[in-house]
Image (spheres, rainbow, N blue to C red):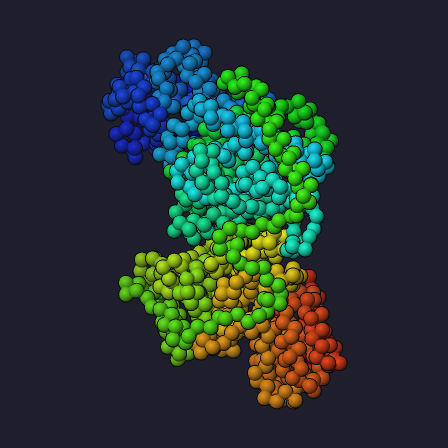
Amino acid sequence: MSGNFNSVFQNNAGYVEEMFARYSSDPNSVGIEWRSYFEGFHEGFGTATALASNVSHYDELLKNIGENSSKEKDHSPSSSINADSLSFEFKVAAYVQAWKTHGHLQAKTNPLGYEAPKAPTLFPETYGISKEDFTRKTSAGLLIGLNIMKFEELSLELQKRFAGVVGAEIEHIECPEEKAWLHAEFAKIHAPVDKETQKSIYHELAKADSLEKTIATKYIGKKRFSIEGADAQFPAVESYMEQAAKLGAQECTVAIAHRGRLNFLVNVIGKPLERLFTEFEGYPHDGLHGDCDVKYHYGYESERQTRNGQKINISMPFNPSHLEYVGSVAMGDTRARQTMYYNGDTSKVTSIVLHGDAAFSGQGIVFENVQMMSLQGYNVGGTIHIVANNQVGFTTDPSDSRSATYCTDVAKVTGSPVFHINADNLDELHNLMVMAANYRYKFKKDFYVDLVCFRRYGHNETDEPSFTQPLLYKVIKDKLAPFEEYAKYLTTSHSFIDDELKAIYNKYRADMNAVYDKVKSEHMHIEQFVPLREAGELKLASEKEMLKPAKTQLSLTKIKELAVKICHLPETFTPNPKLARIIVSERKEMAEGNKKLDWGMAELLAYATLLNEGYSVRLAGEDAQRGTFSHRHVTLVDFENGSRYTSISECAKENSKVEIINTLLSEEAAMGYEYGYAVRNAKGLVLWEGQFGDFANGAQVIIDQFIASGETKWGQTQGLVLLLPHGMEGQGAEHSSARLERFLQLCANGNMQVCYFTNASQIYHALRRQVTRNFRKPLILMTPKSFLRSPRAATTLEELASGHFEEILDDSRIAKASKVERVLFCTGKISLDLFDALDKDEYKNKSETTAIIRIEQLYPFHMEKAISILSHYKNVKVIGWVQEEPANMGAWSYIRNELHNVIKKSGIQNEIYYFGRSRRATPAVGLEKQHFIEQEKVIKGALEANHSIEV
């Protein structure tokens, strides 16, 4: 209830009593503001039940409140004492609630000693409590599990709990049970930590600092993005993993940007130190694959033990310098392992994502990642987020990098708890991380830790931070290292011996120096990462190997059997009447061989056959179940009850998994998630579909930094398929182009496949090829829109059974190659437009003399096949490339050099002509009629002109 509590309770005490009595008897008998307030009041007593059921007088007080609440009060002057008491209790209850909600604003979370400004919402007078009330006894402490006490004592207790070295944001959570649990656990945040755990924490801090100091002295001036100042992240993760393993976790994914990454790779993930030092040495050798990457972008994976000796498989995904993007990749990796190895049990595989404060509050992908928490297609049972709050981002102060109070405020949109903690207080941090593990296990939700720390140096070790933050760095300069700070605490408060602690640190330094000496003396070579389990069995393939035919055929009998299964619906399922007629009945005809297969049916058969062979299929997209253009309908919705049925699931073997997901309206995080999933799931087909192809623009970082370059940088393979609807059809600039040119610009070194098909059999064989080979490559597909159901793109069951993938399709119409005078190379939709034109009377005389050669796979380009096909046409006079995209877009900039070499190697003297649109600033015109005028000119020029034509 909003407003001035003093005026409400002091001047209207009798009225308040009456409202409370009515609410107790029937909550609906009072207005919504009163109901909201009293619900909060009672909720506090629910918290008290969890916190302090053993407090003396507790049961008696609840009984008295219940009895008093159930009676109508006499509001005569004689009842003014009772009214005053009740008014006071309500005031104090409001004050307690304010501390529960806003106490974190006064918490002493800054290790650099900066004090938070006083918050008026926590002043007693705000609630009408005067200094004369300080000695009055109150029962409101029961709201947080305390005894009846004087108000001044209660006020001190509130400050102790909510304004200590840990600040709690819990009250925004809607679930009463969850809030009560969190408050109960938070009340134990200062519980003593046993000496063995304290010793482990010191070891971890000492190890972290030792590594940084060793690198700093051995590789002077080299970038390492030191963890120093945020060292507490290391024991925080160790505390979490220890407790998570006790609760049954067997695997953990840890994602982090570049700050502290080297330290985590060695000390947490288990990368051998000598391998890190060989990367600092940086000598290339013949055994290295690809271009490699800087050392602080690498990932690693190992099996190791927690503090108490339990085994856990731990991995860190590779990550370029794009900070928060790895969060979605880590979540995808986590989900894949939960699905593949533990039948979806989220308790077995957990994930931790470590962030920086400026990036967490500044990058939009964070919000996309956060929103995935409870979504059926993305839920991983909760992620632990630790934000290393350096109190500066590069050279930007918090006041210039966010409008929110905290860098973690975005976390509250999902009703997740947020705790702000002083990084100097390692014992409380340990308790908090144990709490995080228990919370995730119990509630399956995200948990956020704002670890307020500092950054010892600049953005990297060569920066001078005092140029831009001179006052901050005067304080940091005099600040002890975290291991020293903790050692001081252990020796003064817990009887640890200072010399023993120093000996531990010195031993780490000596051991690391010895490893360095070994690397130098033995001239050890860089070793590239080889993933564990199935992914480690895949080979790294060259362009030449990618062009070898893949066996994708299945028997006609098996394909027909699966086609019939796809069309079957349970007797209790009622499809939409329109779909029953248009989709279901048509597909039955296709399955029976009475009708050619359209694109959607061929695609579904690719999934069905793979599922039947033991592979898994995961397709996620903004309209994936239906398909943007209503062509797929892989998941049908019951017309009567809204239940969903995915027909291809009936084709799956026991260990095969099928997920068809309508994704959140995100590109960056959604595509990053599927990338992480695809990296892990070597025995499955993973696809992401854009509603329109240009939607992929929103995920350019994932495409550039992960999909296109992950193999050459990191030796990491994956077979993610991007389905991107593409084609100029008069729909304007934004829904026409999937930016084919951008993908082709990224192609090199056999890094991926870029295709634009014209026949449904091609999608069938290409998708099967993705997983039947012993290597993985991303597949970028320009998928059709208008010709999804075109008879020219249709195929037959027989073609699926006996055919194979074709990188280039010759013109099957041509009876005599000697008659051909014009050869037109093209890709995708424009080829069907050309075929349609040649059937018209206007161009029928050109039909036998014009060959249309379709480049179905643009990269890797099959040079030998192209030469073989062109060589058949000995009498050719005009050779051209036809495209509907503008000249500076589409495939022209890429393909012209390839075709020039084809012509040259074929022994033909012709040059290559261009038939298409002129260079444009946008992919397509906005006027539909203008589009068709231009399209007709392109077709006419291609079929008639003897020189290049730009429209």
- Residue, x 51% and y 67% (percent of image)? 769
x and y percent of residue 709 in the render? 62, 55
Whether residue 226 is visible here, answered yes or no, is no
Instruction: Please tell me whether residue 934 is drawn above or below residue 360 in the rendered image.
Output: below
**Nearer to us in this view, 343 or 596:** 343
Residue 460: x and y, percent?
68, 37
Residue at left 49%, top 57%? 682
* Residue positioned most to the front: 522
Name the side, left or right, on which 490 lies relative to 288.
left
Q: For the point 47% across and 17% down, which residue is it? A: 125
From the viewer's perspective, tell me whether residue 638 is left or right of residue 210: left
Residue 213 visible at all: yes
Expressed as whole percent of the image width and height from the top left, the position of residue 914 reads 70, 74
Q: Is residue 241 above or below residue 8?
A: below
Q: Is residue 91 left or right of residue 767?
A: left
Residue 894 quadrant = bottom right
Quarter of the image with the N terminus in it: top left
Q: How many marks?
A: 0
- Residue 537 in percent (x, y) is at 52, 57
Q: Is residue 838 positioned above or below 450 on the image? A: below
Which residue is at the front of the view, 47 or 12?
47
Considering only vertical position in the picture, is 782 above or below 460?
below
Q: Which image quarter is the C terminus in?
A: bottom right
Residue at figure coordinates x 55%, y 71% from the top left: 549
Quarter location, residue 395: top right
Which sits in the foreground, 359 or 428?
428
